Amino acid sequence: MNLIKRTWKPYLFGILLTEAVGGLAAVLTREATKLYGVTIRKPPLSPPAAVFPVVWTILYALMGVSAARIYSLSPSAERTGALRLYLLQLAVNFAWSIIFFNYQAFGLAFFWLILLFALLVRMILVFRDLDPTAARLQLPYLLWVFFAGYLNYGVWMLNR
């Protein structure tokens, strides 16, 4: 295994980049999220709206630290591939918010979330081969996306 360079800059960049993507999604879906909160029927176990920004802020920070650990490894084709996979899943995550909230295309959003889940599983397996800690840092995100799948499916079924 490659040695991890011990510097804070990649960690700061990883966290800020990931939080910025999440923040942009939040800004672009702000009005639709408010409308969703009052007009959409939600399945059992739906958390209050205030829970989502807290959870996502924590998850994005963990994701950023995980990606920074991978970035901090010695350059290699495997590291580059892992980082590309990270950016791809981040883009899919971003697009889900737009599909779900702005377009209220709940069925499409559900299948998009399945794509995200598959990308996350693949990314975690790739990360595990490079840095097991980086892979473990992604597990809360994977579990949350699984739960989001339940919520997304429930919203789709209840609001057809």
Image (spheres, rainbow, N blue to C red):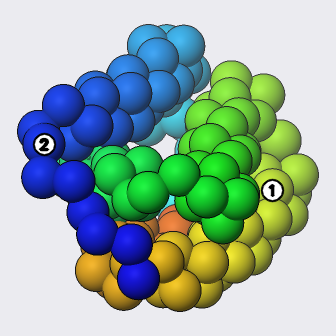
Does residue 123 sit above or below 128 in this rendering?
A: above
Kind of element beneath mark 1: helix
Task: In this rendered view, identify the residue nearer to me: 79 or 90.
Answer: 79
In the rendering, at what x and y percent does residue 32 appear? 56, 21
Q: Quadrant of the C terminus?
A: bottom right
Q: Residue at x 53, y 34 (%)?
A: 36
Neighbor class of circle 1 (other Cα within 10 Å; few <14, some 14-19, many 20+) is some
Q: What residue lies at 69% left-to-right and 78% top-to-bottom? A: 122
Most foreground residue, 103 or 141: 141
| Residue 41 picture quarter | bottom right
* Residue at which label 1 appears: 112
Q: Residue at x 28, y 80 (%)?
A: 133
Q: How many numbered dots are placed on residues in this image?
A: 2
| Distance between mark 2 and mark 1 Cα atoms | 35 Å
Which tag, 2 or 1, sits closer to the chain's start? 2
The answer to whether residue 8 shows anywhere in this view is yes
Q: Residue 143, percent across and down?
A: 43, 80
Could you say which is closer to the camera, residue 120 or residue 44?
A: 120
- For the point 21% across and 41% down, the residue is 11
Which numbered marker is on residue 7?
A: 2
- Type of residue at label 1? Trp
Q: Is residue 79 above or below residue 140?
A: above
What secondary structure is marked by label 2?
Answer: loop
Answer few, some or many: residues within 10 Å of disc 2's Cα (few below 14, many 20 plus, some between 14 and 19).
few
| Residue 85 found in image quarter | bottom right
| Relative depth, front residue between 104 and 90 | 90
Instruction: Assign the N terminus to one quadrant of the image.
Output: bottom left
Q: Amino acid at mark 2?
A: Thr
Would residue 23 be found to the left or right of residue 147 on screen? Answer: left
